[in-house]
Amino acid sequence: MTDKNPEYDFKWCPGCGDFGVRRALEQAVARRLTDTEEPIENTVVVAGIGCSGNMVHLLEGPQPFGIHGLHGRSLPIAFGTKMARPELNVVVVAGDGDFLSIGMEHIAPQAQRNLNVTAVIMDNAVYGLTKGQSSPTSELGMVTSSTPYGKPEEGLNALKLYLTYGVSHVASAMSSKIKDLAGMVYDAMEYPGFSIVHVQSPCTEFNDTYQELKGKPREGIPGLAWDIPDSHDTRDIRAANGIVEQGGVPLGVVYQAEPKLPLEKRVEKMNANARVRTPQEMLNSYTS
Amino acid sequence: MTDKNPEYDFKWCPGCGDFGVRRALEQAVARRLTDTEEPIENTVVVAGIGCSGNMVHLLEGPQPFGIHGLHGRSLPIAFGTKMARPELNVVVVAGDGDFLSIGMEHIAPQAQRNLNVTAVIMDNAVYGLTKGQSSPTSELGMVTSSTPYGKPEEGLNALKLYLTYGVSHVASAMSSKIKDLAGMVYDAMEYPGFSIVHVQSPCTEFNDTYQELKGKPREGIPGLAWDIPDSHDTRDIRAANGIVEQGGVPLGVVYQAEPKLPLEKRVEKMNANARVRTPQEMLNSYTS
Amino acid sequence: MKKTDFVIRFAGEGGQGFQTAAQGFAAANVQAGYHAQTFATFPSQITGGPTWFQVRVSTTPVLSRGDKLDVLVAFNEYAYETHKDDVSDEGVVVYDSKMLELPDDGRSLGVPFEQLGKSTGNQRAANMVVMGCLAGLMSMPQSILEDFVSKRYANVQRYGEKTIPQNIHGLTLGREEAVKSGFALGELAPPEKPDYEQLFLNGNEAISLGAAHAGLNFYAGYPISPATTILMWMQQHYVGEDRFVYQVSSEIEAINAIIGAGYSGKKSMTATAGPGFSLMSEGLGLAWMAEIPIVVCDVQRGGPATGLPTKTEQSDLYQAMHPAHGDVSLPVIAAGSVEECFYAAIAAFNWAERYQGPVILLSEHAFEGRNQNIRKPDLSKIPVENRNIYVSNNGSDSYHRYESRELGPFPVPGGPGSYVANASEHDGMGDTTHLPERHVQMTERRFGKLKLLEDGDYESDNTEAGIAVMPWGGSKGPAREAWNEIQGNGDTELSWYYTMFLNPLPSRLLEELRTKDLVIVPELNYQGQFSSILRTQGVNAESLTQYTGLPFKVGELRQRILNRIQVDAKEGALV
Amino acid sequence: MKKTDFVIRFAGEGGQGFQTAAQGFAAANVQAGYHAQTFATFPSQITGGPTWFQVRVSTTPVLSRGDKLDVLVAFNEYAYETHKDDVSDEGVVVYDSKMLELPDDGRSLGVPFEQLGKSTGNQRAANMVVMGCLAGLMSMPQSILEDFVSKRYANVQRYGEKTIPQNIHGLTLGREEAVKSGFALGELAPPEKPDYEQLFLNGNEAISLGAAHAGLNFYAGYPISPATTILMWMQQHYVGEDRFVYQVSSEIEAINAIIGAGYSGKKSMTATAGPGFSLMSEGLGLAWMAEIPIVVCDVQRGGPATGLPTKTEQSDLYQAMHPAHGDVSLPVIAAGSVEECFYAAIAAFNWAERYQGPVILLSEHAFEGRNQNIRKPDLSKIPVENRNIYVSNNGSDSYHRYESRELGPFPVPGGPGSYVANASEHDGMGDTTHLPERHVQMTERRFGKLKLLEDGDYESDNTEAGIAVMPWGGSKGPAREAWNEIQGNGDTELSWYYTMFLNPLPSRLLEELRTKDLVIVPELNYQGQFSSILRTQGVNAESLTQYTGLPFKVGELRQRILNRIQVDAKEGALV
Ligand SMILES: Cc1ncc(C[n+]2csc(CCOP(=O)(O)OP(=O)(O)O)c2C)c(N)n1
Ligand SMILES: Cc1ncc(C[n+]2csc(CCOP(=O)(O)OP(=O)(O)O)c2C)c(N)n1
Ligand code: SF4
Ligand code: SF4
Ligand SMILES: [Mg+2]
Ligand SMILES: [Mg+2]
């Protein structure tokens, strides 16, 4: 078992939401060890490029395997790793820019396939690592380092998008609620299909939304975040759509499709009747 | 005015749906000349790569300007042309593979921006030009040249996707109903914002769905296609979502948002208070 | 004297189905013990458009498609006009006399193929009449085609009882027409039937089979001509345990997917062509940087951008070697024939596993459309290399994949030695670092590994001559034929070199080349890409280029080589 | 004798704010008439991490950051340990005595900067104390810094009345500490105030201003270090009519968007770095093929893949010249200084318009982080080329853009001459064709146009010598300084060549280079990319490479050049 690299010295800014997400991920993976005896080496963390993606280097203690690939390409890489070795636990960690801007094209295909991986998205509504430019989830009119006069694009409703793409399991969380988040990540990993845990993970440096999200309950000022009521039927896609259209940031499991075949099983099923041949047999069929 | 190239000899297969789409596009552009006196050279047709994209070379008579770019990149190119020259009429023509597979990432951003162009998508649920492989709109289990044992992915509901992305104007059509289609394309071009006309354009060579779409009305066998009732309120996004979730292929205008600012106007508005300076003035500000 | 080879071209409109006839004609001859090669060219559209298909049959291995035609089978007037000048002086033009009227040029033979075909009772027997007619013109024993037909349609349940007799009837009708016409092209010498088994297949099939033998586990691809048929072959045939094959949503997904699979310990591959290859640029850089074994096959087509999707060219070499930003030099193996497609694919996997990184396998459009006989490989004799997997750290946490300047074992998920495969510059565990020493060390590690690949084999011949001819890829065949002719005529002294291992070059080969006064590189691109690369390595190389979208013609190439040498001789260099 | 230059390095943790002090110190000196250059290096993270910032002030134009430090300002122990060996023998280390304890090495000066700063009543005046201290050590007239402060904080409404006196007080406190300490570094000779106006700016600002002068209409970009600040500059400053600036969703969108804009008749540009540049591969091929004028600026950073985002390297040259599959050779202009960033940007637009195609503008991370004084350009004297737009066909439909082998006018939408800009091989109107003749003609047209760009200017010096030094890009400064020293010492005879026009090379320059026995190319990459390219063109070039992520040091480079020449001398070549 490889331990954390003591020499690695990249740091998130103080208060960055990603710290909480890291703790939650560590806890979820640790719980797999206790619950199912799955060793940590069975987990592969596929990271996007961004402050968020640096998480793959910052996990404490015993280390999972990791890939810190290219900006926007965590899903295709995860697809490759998972389908080459379906027994692995593959987790994507990426930012809103990585996942929803340059990497946008990769979400729908995985949803259509029901690729059996979990993506943990850290949404801070900015590009943190490149110093605070607007991202797809920044709101219309938002002033950022790249939109000094306001962003001319509407903000993307990521949760709604996931539902339309047909993502099987969609959860929404906040980085500061570590225990809840750890539970959601754990459940998402357990779920046999494509799951996304979309986390509000504020960027204290360029877009500090902690206050906005939490509000000031004592002073009666409501925050943007609100808990999805227990009564919500997570199997009900209409109800789920209702939740994500209500505005604000719903917290909890938004949707969990009745488990359908994950990709590895689909392929097995499709190919069940195909003839399996050795390379020699294939070669022989070209004999003149 | 440049005339059609008499030497160009690419041909669609007999019966290909794209013939109808071509006629409709020609009619719509011609009508702009009569209705608004916009000369044909003011139109730029940006084509994807596929049988469908070859349309840019096959238009009869006086020629618009055209770009036959790269597979999947018609929207970014159209974005560039339109925002550089907002007075132009920019039309995208592309196939389902081009637009919804390799080009998928480009739709949401244009929707969020409300880019003022019209995309005419020829959906035959296969990759025609590369000989009949499955595309994102092919259904689960469909047997194609690349899925000999059945497609393991679910088919994409393109119309629903457009609505979720926030495309301002969404219409659905069939290539054989040329007059209807011409009207829809004309209206979409008139609409001040991002508009998509999604056309069922069967591939007689690899996926001939004419029968399936039309059914046999005389024999009482219903087709997949059905007309959106006149009573449908195209401004109502919920109703629109209802339409695209009903299954089959609805024909008609699905959604038309209350016109909001197209991108060129948004940018103007955002920058209204910014200081406009000459290069000399900018240079001067660095004087030591 | 009997003839040693025949060249037949079928030309018409795409979709006229003559491809089947041509293909069958070639297959029949191979079955009889001849060597054969086919060649196809068509526009990028599904139905129609000017198309031609060529077959060359010979008593010795076929090196090129053949410059001059013995028979042109013309299916329309445009085809006749376009191709008639390629017919040799003794050649014949054959056409369907009910479909076409050709000028009476004294060498054209009209036969009502379609009509005669139908008269057999089989609607699709016209092709048989064509074949019979060709056989007649070439005085080919009737048995060759009959044997072929009997074997091909042996499955009575599938084809019905009548198919064989009807088809044989068609062959006979065609032959009779030829005999009746009085045209005769001489007789092909009997085949020297080889004492080994033969395969008859095209380049993409050979690549697919090579990958299968090498132990491919994971294939992801996106359709693109002329690589699509590899994807389709895989989808069709490569099912079973530890074989995952998938059509993904783009080439960017493909390259990243195979990187994910390679990382996880599996042998993985994608195949693409120009535009898709360019889209893989960033991913190839990642595989180089993180040292992930993958094989990327680029079946080259013509031109930049979308270019000429259905024409052949050898113009992706620069991109293959240096596909991405930063210091990157990817191993490149380029197949030079259908047979080499098979071996090159295996070598590509072996290299990828050995040096733990991405390998580019170059093929060409010409091979996709070319069916050729090759000696059936004895799989038991073709070594397959497997990755050196890191298996144990004895409970310690001390193994760090990138620690050393030299290559060590490769940890895979689920096992010990967890690390991060990192696109950023990294330390021993793969964590990001910006230390100058580390960037120096890792850069040298990445380039140093290429040394493991310098032992590729190569051909050399007549090595004393100071001027050499050294083609690459698919120009090998025409260049060799031209070289053979030059040597055979005693025109001049030329040495011959050839390798499919283009980067790194076999070290001994490079040494030899550096001693030459001039290395002439026939290649199908404008820039003379391979000769440029040789020049950067201290070889005095110069290209003979062609960029028409078609392969070299042997005669032209021979003349150009001779011209070049004469110039050199005039300038006083050694010949 | 008075000193002619000073080198000061500030080293610590990112976010400690010393960048402001360093920047201010440089700016103040420039304002006083000195020449100055800054240099920055930091890790790829937002807060913290080992960071340093260097300022060189001189009486003559500054060519490099300076090898040896006169002053090291250390903000933590790690910084001290890492950098102390770079301090010259007479140098001094300065640190905040309340934050840090350093070993008493006899050349370290502890000053309670923070505390003294706060004592002025201004919480942020610590930087002023540092500057004052530096000025004291360097015996710099107090007026230089005071003038700067008075000018910088002149806006009383914005900064309040107290800021200037407080800051000046801070300067004085710092100076007093220096004087008290007894350390003294000698005195900088007075500036030779130039008789022209100076700008003080960095490379990305210079590029942006160059693009503005060239008449940029359309900018699309995606953030990526070290190119992001060009996007942000544009967003901030480049508003107004016919100026569209946009952050798009990826580099693939960026390249295609500017192609769409270029097609429509506008001057368009994007800027990116390695990974984004690789993603543009396919789009660059399209622009080449369809002949669309665009400018793509690649601000090079270190390494392949994600590499070293905040380090400098010159390793994208291969990718710049041949970014895509097929026969493609893009024009490349590489800036060699902050000043050249401005002129190179203008030249890139001029080339793009002139030859109607894509042009690569190479810059380097080192320029983004470098502030430097440059002579203020006289815009009225810098020619801007505009596209030859097709304006009339007199009602006929006979103009076809691609008909001729030579370049003709460019039709734009809305006007006459409609055609298709086609990524596939095309005929005169841009319709797809597969005819061999056409592919030949169009390929020759595309390459032939490069001839229009062979008139670039270049530097040459001491051209009689048989061995030349010829750096490119940012290695120009250190190489020139090394060359100056070698020539000054009379050590040996070396000629000097330099151009920012790397492809195509100025034809006269190429001719000269071919006559040299050896051309030594100092460059920051492993493969020796530029010397390889020169070798393909018949120049006997050889690289001196470095791949640490940092620029050359002058002393080291000088020594390596001398070593290389000695080897050559031993081998009997002409020196
Ligand atoms: C192809 C490519 N383009 C751009 C970049 C530069 N880049 C690095 S991180 C980043 C954005 C990060 O934003 P996000 O994904 O939201 O992550 P965060 O830093 O906010 O966690 C960008 C644009 C890159 N590395 N690669
Ligand atoms: C980057 C790239 N990848 C692949 C191709 C090959 N290709 C050409 S057309 C096509 C698919 C066309 O399908 P679709 O967009 O549905 O158009 P259709 O032919 O069905 O009209 C593909 C994959 C290409 N030209 N470029
Ligand atoms: S910049 Fe923002 S996202 Fe990045 S580490 Fe700092 S707080 Fe976190
Ligand atoms: S292959 Fe299909 S889509 Fe293409 S031209 Fe033929 S019918 Fe039309
Ligand atoms: Mg973010
Ligand atoms: Mg299609």
Image (cartoon, coloured by chain):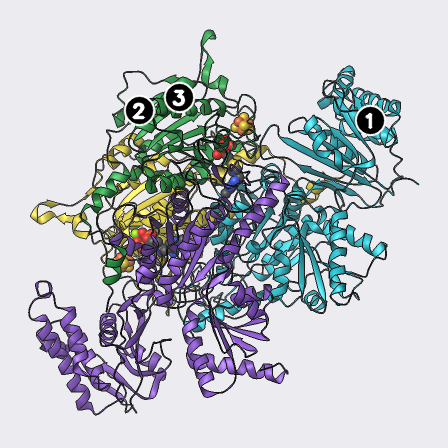
Chain colours: A green, B yellow, C purple, D cyan
Separation of residues labelled 2 and 1 (CA atoms): 64 Å
Q: Can you see residue A55?
A: yes
Q: Is residue C364 above or below residue B213?
A: below
- Tell me the crowding category of disc 1: few under 14, some 14 to 19, or many 20 or more residues within 10 angstroms, Cα based: many
Specify the subunit that label 2 lies on: A
- Pick whichever, A173 or D554, lies toward us: D554
Q: Which residue is mark 2?
A: A242
Say the numbered circle drawn on residue A181: 3
Query: Given this view, does label 2 or label 3 mark the residue nearer the observer?
Result: 3
Q: Find residue C373 and report its horizontal and vertical position in percent.
A: 30, 71
Q: Find residue A64 and report its horizontal and vertical position in percent.
A: 43, 31
Say the numbered circle drawn on residue D133: 1
The residue type indicated by label 2 comes to Gly
Relative to B95, C149 lies left or right: left
Q: Is residue B102 above or below residue C541?
A: above
Seen from this angle, which residue lies furthest top? A218
- Tell me the crowding category of disc 2: few under 14, some 14 to 19, or many 20 or more residues within 10 angstroms, Cα based: few
Separation of residues labelled 2 and 3 (CA atoms): 22 Å
The residue type indicated by label 3 comes to Leu
**Residue in the picture at 41% in, 57% down:** C348
Q: Secondary structure at mark 1?
A: helix
The residue type indicated by label 1 comes to Cys
